[in-house]
Amino acid sequence: MPRPFLKVRPRRAPLPAAARVFLETGDDAAAQAAALEADALFDLFLARRGQVALWQEHGTAITAEWVARQPGTRPWGWWRFEAPEPRRRLGGTGTPKHEVLAFVPVYRCGIPMYWLDSSIDPGDPPRYESQAAYLARLGLLAPGERRRLGAAAFEPEAILPPAAEDGSVPPDHNEEER
């Protein structure tokens, strides 16, 4: 009689600390620092090519651990690969560059990254729903997560223009464009 096939689950390779930092924060410098601290090589070019695969393999665990530490928020990788839509703008004065210039919309945690900084009114800056409000609106809070959040977690988030050394607002400055 033939023997039945045994299903062997492939063993998940451990996620290097640098890759975890990158998937949680999206911060290249922090990932490089974690790689150096662990005396490991972490090639961000290769990581970028494999971001989707890394997230598919480790995203559920990363998100669960993140939510345990920071309820009402999600790690960078979740926003990059799983968020169903950007966060809602609730008001304020300011213009994302993609609305008026030939810029592709780029979001960080569901909020546009690039702004015409001179269009942002410091007295009435653009405001977006908080991560907690977004997750609640879309029914994406984990079981028990809402109970761990205070009222402040649901307050809108304001986008403020970057301040120059003298406290003034430089025109159309974006740190990421350097």
Image (cartoon, rainbow, N blue to C red):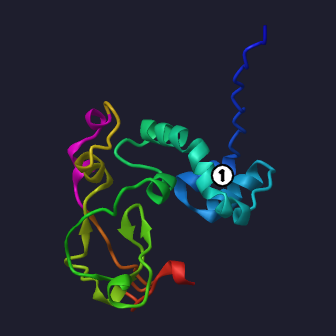
Task: Name the residue type under label 1.
Answer: Ala
At a point 44% along the width and 35% down the height, the residue shown is: 68
Q: Which residues are magenta?
A: 145-156
149 within the magenta span: yes
Give the percent coordinates (x, y) of residue 98.
37, 83
Camera-side residue of 104 and 112: 104
Q: Secondary structure at mark 1?
A: helix
Whether 89 is drawn above or below 130: the answer is below
Give the percent coordinates (x, y) of residue 135.
30, 48
Task: Please indicate whether residue 129 sits to the left or right of residue 170 in the image.
Answer: left
Q: How many marks?
A: 1
Reading the image, the residue beneath label 1 is 19
Give residue 127's quadrant in the image: bottom left
The quadrant of the rendering that contains the C terminus is bottom right
At a point 68% along the width and 52% down the height, the residue shown is: 18
Whether 100 is drawn above or below 17: the answer is below
Task: List the single residue furthest toward the top.
Answer: 1
Whether 65 is drawn above or below 34: the answer is above
Task: Please indicate whether residue 154 sits to the left or right of residue 8 in the image.
Answer: left
